[in-house]
Image: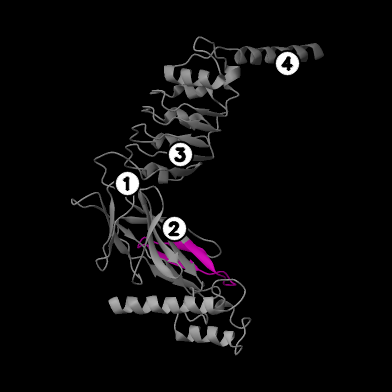
């Protein structure tokens, strides 16, 4: 009996050895070239499955690859660079259950829907500079957690959506800013509220424009590449919400019907959105400062990001009444002349240096001056 078991084990080991020694036959010459370069082999060398089994990361970019069926020989690959080839079908890539980073830039792809069936549990995919107009299938539930890089840089000249890869609003020192990044060389961002306009810089950096007014409703941002105009996008202003312990509040985003809210969540409380794009937030039993964040889509195209702050105090609001006024300035002055204490008014230390001094007073004065200018120009 023992001899029989040993014989079975020996046969299994031999079978594994034979498979490992098998010569790999490639479908794509470019794929074969890249694998041999990675392994340090010359062009006439034989590649075995044992060798390709060891590959966990490989760069196969710019090799004229049109067919990726050869990925079957890379069962352990985790990072795969296929950028700037001419791949038409990504379906074979879905068989790689170890793949976690995939670079598909510049392949002229029109769809990556088959990646939704991937065996991997998480994957970062760079799809910049392709011709993909619809990511709808990727928005449906899958077993894989996808993260897209370069998603908004599709180069099809007929694409109805302009190449913007970040567009959102947020607070900076108490003022609302519109943030944007673009790829195009001649590109502008036109804020369509109160005639405010600004030219976007196409330098790959994150640029911002400070609003001279307080935005309380969706802002129409016009995107274009010249006098012909272009795309229009609605972005939401950052809001500050006050919610009591265990209480809830509703926020009507006022977005158009063809928009959608996805990836909605809060750090501590719970946030949901209904079919009318109204967000309902419920605070935890012990209300704490919280942040609600979500992503905005329009017909399967990502259009921007938004963030609401719950029970957070704006800069300069020392007494917590949700506005910055002369009362806040008086509290800072009283602390400076020892008529009040920092312990009683911790928000008076505006710059967070542990003391209340002329720097904190000047910050409130600057806020009040900006507020006065905004009211005068309204």
Vertical side of 222 occupied by 81: above or below: above
Q: Nearer the viewer, mark 1 or mark 2?
A: 1
Q: Nearer the viewer, mark 3 or mark 2?
A: 3
The residue closer to the viewer here, 153 or 281, is 153
At a point 54% along the width and 65% down the height, the residue shown is 269
- Sequence-wise first label, 3 or 4: 4
The residue to which callout 1 is attached is: 163
In x, y percent, where is residue 171?
44, 66
- Sequence-wise first label, 3 or 2: 3
How much space separates mark 2 and mark 4, taking CA atoms? 56 Å
Q: Could you classify mark 1 by the number of other residues whose Cα lies within 10 Å: few (under 14), some (14-19), or many (20 or more)?
A: many
Q: Give the magenta-colored segment's residue range.
A: 270-292
The residue closer to the viewer here, 327 or 115, is 327
- Sequence-wise first label, 1 or 2: 1
The residue to which callout 4 is attached is: 9
Total marks drawn?
Answer: 4
Numbered mark located on residue 125 in the image: 3
Q: Are marks 2 and 4 in contact (CB under 8 Å)?
A: no
In x, y percent, where is residue 261?
39, 57
């Amino acid at each position: 009996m023992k001899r029989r078991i040993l014989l079975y084990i020996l046969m299994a080991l031999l079978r594994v050895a034979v498979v490992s020694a098998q010569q790999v036959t490639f479908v794509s010459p470019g794929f074969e070239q890249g694998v041999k370069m990675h392994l340090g082999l010359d062009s006439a060398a034989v590649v075995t499955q044992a060798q390709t089994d060891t590959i966990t990361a490989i760069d196969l970019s710019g090799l004229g690859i049109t067919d990726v069926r050869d990925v079957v020989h890379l069962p352990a690959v985790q990072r795969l660079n296929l950028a700037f080839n001419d791949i038409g079908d990504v379906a074979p890539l879905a068989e790689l259950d170890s793949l976690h980073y995939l670079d598909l830039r510049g392949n002229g792809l029109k769809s990556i829907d088959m990646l939704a069936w991937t065996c991997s549990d998480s994957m970062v995919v760079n799809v910049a500079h392709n011709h993909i107009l619809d990511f709808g299938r990727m928005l449906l539930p899958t077993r894989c957690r996808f993260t897209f890089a370069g998603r908004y840089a599709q180069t099809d000249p007929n694409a109805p959506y302009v190449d913007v890869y970040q567009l959102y609003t947020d607070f900076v020192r108490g003022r609302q800013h519109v943030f944007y990044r673009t790829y195009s060389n001649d590109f502008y961002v036109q804020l369509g509220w109160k005639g405010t306009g600004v030219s976007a810089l196409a330098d790959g950096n994150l640029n911002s424009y400070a609003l001279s007014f307080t935005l309380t409703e969706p802002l129409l941002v016009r995107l274009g590449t010249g006098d012909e105009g272009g795309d229009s996008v609605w972005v939401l202003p950052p809001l500050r919400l006050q919610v009591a312990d265990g209480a809830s509040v509703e926020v009507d985003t006022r977005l158009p019907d063809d928009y959608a809210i996805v990836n909605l969540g809060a750090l501590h409380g719970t946030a949901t959105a209904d079919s009318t794009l109204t967000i309902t937030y419920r605070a935890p039993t012990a209300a704490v400062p919280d942040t609600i964040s979500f992503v905005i889509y329009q017909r399967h195209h990502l259009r921007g990001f938004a963030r609401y702050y719950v029970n957070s105090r704006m800069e300069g609001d020392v007494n917590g009444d949700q506005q910055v006024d002369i009362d806040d300035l008086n509290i800072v002055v009283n602390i400076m002349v020892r008529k009040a204490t920092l312990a009683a008014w911790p928000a008076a230390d505006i710059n967070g240096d542990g003391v209340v001094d002329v720097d904190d007073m000047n910050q409130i004065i600057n806020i009040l001056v900006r507020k006065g200018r905004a009211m005068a120009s309204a």
